[in-house]
């Protein structure tokens, strides 16, 4: 594994960072203050992102994306992650990779418009009674002739307000396994406006102002079989094949924000004076900086290695769990210490630190909680010795 960046990767980092600093940072204060991302603002930034070749750059070149390898894609994610989440997710969207699993017709209808910036997607698995334990989902899709009829509720669904359609996972049957009965899951495309499908406002959330989550209700929502994504009863297989690296995406965006917070802390430690000297000269402050930088590097190396292994086809669930766990926890640590180094000013919204600190909180919960990542890691360790 080569730790240096290629010329192309350097260019990706520089271009994305310049875009983030020039086009996203100036709007952060408005989004934070209003808690809302204006449609005109979305369209303005989106047009610039498309022009700069940064929009949907996660996608393969043959469908109109940038065709990046995983290491390069995650470098781009890290730079986007520096900014307010609502701004970068909506205005420089990265459509879900799972759209690549669709049939040719489904790609025409769902994938390409997302890549062109005409539509947005959202993904719905979680339910009020089924979070970490997704197999425990209660929402159902029952086959009726050639159709499926969907009933039940999904919640915490990110971006469902702006999305034009949802990729929804439903329990479609049961099977016997050596460990008892297990639900079979099927994934569907559900268009907004389909009778029986309602999107309701979700909960107010401490992290990521300007971004929303929603509640999806299905009440005898009838879909033709052509709306199935992948194979019937193979929803988790399609998710596992196409959503594997999403945890690395979360890790990378966290690294970007952690680096931004650390940058503020270093500058402040070198300029703020108390007791007649720079506070960075006090070991109580300088050792914090050393620990922050060391932890950040450890998280970055774990993420980079997992990305590299992803491209080699050798990545394990454990590798990706370690990267997600470390990067999200390091972001929380760095955000907190950066505030401490700034004293009272760290808590004021003149600086992005209080926001980075709030935003960090959700990262240890979504895409699999820290406990679930630890479970994945420890299970791999124990299984290796017959545990
Ligand atoms: C803001 C936000 C946006 C989200 N967006 C989406 C989305 O777009 N689509 C979607 O489908 N989902 C989404 N989610 C759901 C998210 O993935 C879940 O919140 C997460 O998986 C945890 O589920 P839960 O909240 O129900 O917690 P629970 O699963 O109920 O967990 C509660 C606690 O128990 C612990 N726990 C559970 N099982 C174990 C175990 N086996 N071992 C040890 N500890 C355990 C957890 O770690 C946690 O601390 C979102 C969540 C949030 C907060």
Image (cartoon, rainbow, N blue to C red):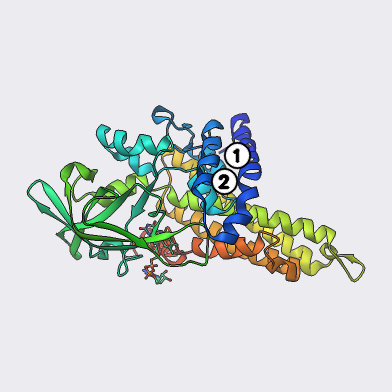
Badge 1 marks a residue whose secondary structure is: helix
CB under 8 Å between discs 1 and 2: yes
Look at 52% across and 36% down and name the residue there. 47
Look at 28% across and 38% down and name the residue there. 102
Horizontally, residue 64 falls left or right of residue 99, namely right
Marks 1 and 2, the one that precedes in the sequence = 1
* Residue at the farthest top position: 62
Q: Is residue 331 visible?
A: no
The quadrant of the picture showing ligand 1 is bottom left
Horizontally, residue 338 falls left or right of residue 208, namely right
**Picture coordinates of residue 51 (x, y %)?**
54, 31
Q: Quadrant of the N terminus?
A: top right
Residue nearest the viewer, comparing 234 with 299: 234
Badge 2 crowding class, 10 Å Cα cut-off, few under 14, some 14 to 19, many 20 or more, is many
Q: Which residue is mark 1?
A: 16
**Picture coordinates of residue 353 (x, y %)?**
66, 61
Position of 162 relative to 275 (above/below)? above
Residue nearest the viewer, comparing 303 with 65: 65
Mark 2 close to ligand 1, CB under 8 Å:
no
Q: Is residue 243 visible?
A: yes
Q: Which residue is mark 2?
A: 80
Badge 1 crowding class, 10 Å Cα cut-off, few under 14, some 14 to 19, many 20 or more, is many
Q: Quadrant of the C terminus?
A: bottom left
**Picture coordinates of residue 54 (x, y %)?**
53, 36
């Amino acid at each position: 594994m080569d730790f240096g960046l290629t010329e192309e990767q350097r260019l990706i980092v520089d271009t994305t960072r310049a875009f983030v600093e020039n086009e996203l940072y100036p709007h952060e204060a408005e989004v934070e203050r209003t808690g809302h991302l204006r449609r005109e603002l979305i369209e303005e930034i989106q047009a610039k992102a498309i022009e700069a070749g940064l929009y949907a750059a996660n996608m393969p070149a043959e469908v109109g994306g940038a065709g990046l390898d995983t290491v390069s894609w995650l470098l781009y994610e890290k730079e986007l992650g520096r900014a307010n989440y609502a701004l970068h997710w909506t205005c420089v969207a990265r459509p879900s990779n799972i759209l690549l699993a669709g049939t040719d017709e489904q790609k025409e209808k769902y994938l390409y418009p997302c890549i062109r910036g005409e539509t947005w997607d959202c993904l719905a698995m979680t339910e009020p009674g089924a979070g970490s334990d997704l197999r425990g989902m209660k929402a159902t899709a029952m086959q009726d002739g050639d159709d499926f009829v969907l009933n039940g509720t999904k919640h915490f669904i990110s971006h469902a307000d702006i999305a034009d359609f949802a990729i929804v996972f439903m329990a479609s049957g049961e099977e016997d396994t050596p460990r008892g009965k297990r639900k079979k899951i099927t994934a569907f495309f559900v268009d907004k406006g389909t009778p029986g499908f309602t999107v309701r406002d979700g909960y107010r959330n401490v992290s990521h102002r300007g971004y929303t989550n929603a509640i999806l209700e299905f009440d005898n929502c009838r879909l033709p079989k052509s709306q199935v994504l992948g194979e019937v009863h193979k929803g988790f297989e399609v998710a596992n094949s196409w959503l594997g690296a999403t945890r690395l995406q979360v890790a990378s965006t966290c690294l970007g924000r952690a680096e931004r917070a650390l940058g503020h802390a270093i500058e402040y430690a070198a300029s703020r004076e108390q007791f007649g000297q720079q506070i960075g000269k006090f070991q109580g402050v300088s050792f914090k900086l050393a620990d922050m930088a060391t932890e950040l590097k450890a998280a970055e190396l774990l993420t980079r290695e997992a990305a590299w292994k992803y491209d080699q086809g050798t990545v394990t669930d454990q590798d990706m769990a370690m990267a997600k766990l470390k990067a999200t926890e390091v972001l929380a640590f760095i955000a907190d210490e950066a505030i401490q180094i700034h004293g009272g000013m760290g808590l004021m919204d003149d600086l992005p630190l209080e926001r980075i600190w709030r935003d960090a909180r959700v990262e240890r919960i979504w895409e699999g909680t820290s406990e679930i990542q630890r479970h994945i890691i420890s299970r791999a360790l124990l299984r290796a010795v017959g545990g």
